[in-house]
Amino acid sequence: MDYVLLALAIALMIVGLLGCVLPVLPGPPLSYIGLLLVHFTRWVDFSSRFLVIMAMIAVVVTVLDYIVPIWGTKRFGGTKAGMWGATIGMVVGIFFFPPIGLILGPLIGAIAGEAIRGADGRQSIVAGMGSLMGFFLGIGLKLAASLAMTYYFIKALL
């Protein structure tokens, strides 16, 4: 049974890393499940504290991944209309045009929200670019979390 858990854990760690850049896969939660699975083998014994901290990191990073594009819109001068547009664009993109919709949805939504509000084309595009920058920041956060989990995973097995 240990070998089955180890094989599943390795697969989840790999898919978790891929999920950091592929918007349809929740990278850090999958990496965390990989950590949990390897914990239940005879080779690895993570502390409860470590597992709780990693779980909190996975949850926080996953939530932030949905918030940072909206924050990016605001940071680059977008108004509430742009933030609402980015949010609506993200939801529409996730459900109707995955995986590319998750990238382009907030961008197009923020631009549309600002344009509807009456902002000029340049202001709308800058707000949309802020949304896109927020999206890439989210990828970076997910990647950092999953890479940290992968590091501890490998370290525990060696």
Image (spheres, rainbow, N blue to C red):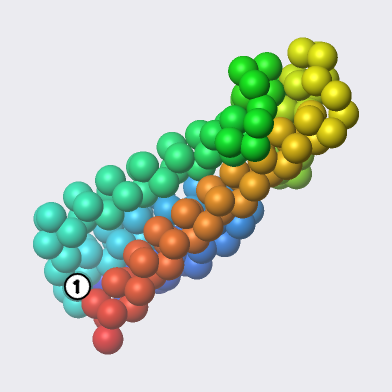
Residue at position x 36%, y 67% from top?
A: 148
Residue at position x 33%, y 78% from top?
A: 154
- Residue placed under numbered mark 1 in the picture: 44
Question: What is the x, y in percent for residue 143?
Answer: 49, 60
Looking at the rendering, in which quadrant would you find the C terminus? bottom left
Which residue, as the protein is rendered here, is positioned at the far right?
Answer: 121
Mark yes or no: residue 152 visible.
yes
Determine whether, in the image, residue 124 is placed left or right of residue 80: right
Compared with 49, 101 (above or below) is: above
Label 1: how many Cα within 10 Å (few below 14, some 14–19, many 20+): some
Residue at position x 35%, y 65% from top?
A: 149
| Along the viewing direction, whichever of 113 and 151 lies nearer the viewer | 113
> What kind of element bears circle 1?
loop
Q: Quadrant of residue 19?
A: bottom right
Residue at position x 22%, y 64% from top?
A: 39
| Along the viewing direction, whichever of 106 and 51 lies nearer the viewer | 106
Looking at the rendering, in which quadrant would you find the N terminus? bottom left
Determine whether, in the image, residue 148 is placed left or right of residue 68: left
Mark yes or no: residue 88 visible.
no
Question: What is the x, y in percent for residue 145?
Answer: 40, 59
Compared with 22, 72 (above or below) is: above
